[in-house]
Amino acid sequence: MKRLLGVFFFILITTSIFGQQIITSLKSDKVWFIGGSAGIAMPVSKYKHDARSGLNFAINYGYMFSDYFGVEAKGFKMNNSITNNINPSFNSSLGDMTGIGAVVGPFIAFRPTRTTEIGVHTMFGVTNVTMPDGAFNNNKRSSFTTNLGGTFRLNLNKLVLFCDVDYLLADPTFDEIPYKITNLTTTLGVAIRFKRVLF
């Protein structure tokens, strides 16, 4: 995990330096964007032994300082089905883990063509985690959250079609799950670009 964090920070630092050198070139006339997406949240690492894949919904909102560098905020809601590995007295799934959170951070973009865009982002924030009733002594916790990921965008003037792949890590420290809650999320979405701030 430390090696993964190091790679992402290296990418963000080096590309942001590059972005500052070209921040005045190819300036987009659509600098704000907002969109929504839906997809799957797949448990990874140790968490995958006690959870199954679920759904992930997100709202993205951001500002591009140039065609290459910006800042992005994301609000999300996801769920995983918790298995009876946590409490063998249950014969089937215990219920769902629900995570509702928000993260924010820098966004670096590369444009292979005029209409396609590939980007990486590193975001941090907070997630409120709720576990199934009955299997946990205290089933609600809040946690600092790290979101590392990338995106592919197809820019069609004001309309943007995109696919996000993210590694989402939270550590709410439940006694019954003595490790971090980690998900690999893949979502498809639609966004719009505009010149003026909405909020």
Image (cartoon, rainbow, N blue to C red):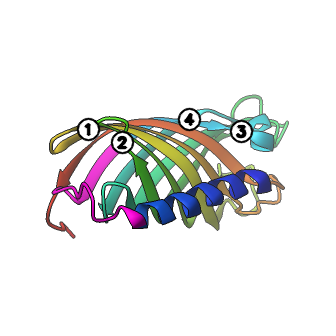
For the residue pair 130 and 28, the one nearer the viewer reads as 28
Give whichever of discs 4 and 2 has the lower sequence position.
Answer: 4
Give whichever of discs 3 and 2 has the lower sequence position.
Answer: 3
The answer to whether residue 25 shows anywhere in this view is: yes
Residue ID for mark 1? 114
The Cα atoms of the two marked residues, 1 and 3, are separated by 35 Å
The Cα atoms of the two marked residues, 4 and 3, are separated by 12 Å
Residue contact between numbered discs 2 and 1, judged by CB atoms under 8 Å: yes
Residue ID for mark 3? 44
| Disc 4 packing (10 Å; few <14; some 14–19; many ≥20) | many
Residue ID for mark 4? 54
Give whichever of discs 1 and 4 has the lower sequence position.
Answer: 4
- Kind of residue at disc 3: Val
Residue contact between numbered discs 3 and 2, judged by CB atoms under 8 Å: no
Residue 88 x, y percent position in the rendering:
85, 36
| Disc 1 packing (10 Å; few <14; some 14–19; many ≥20) | few
- Kind of residue at disc 1: Arg
Residue contact between numbered discs 4 and 2, judged by CB atoms under 8 Å: no
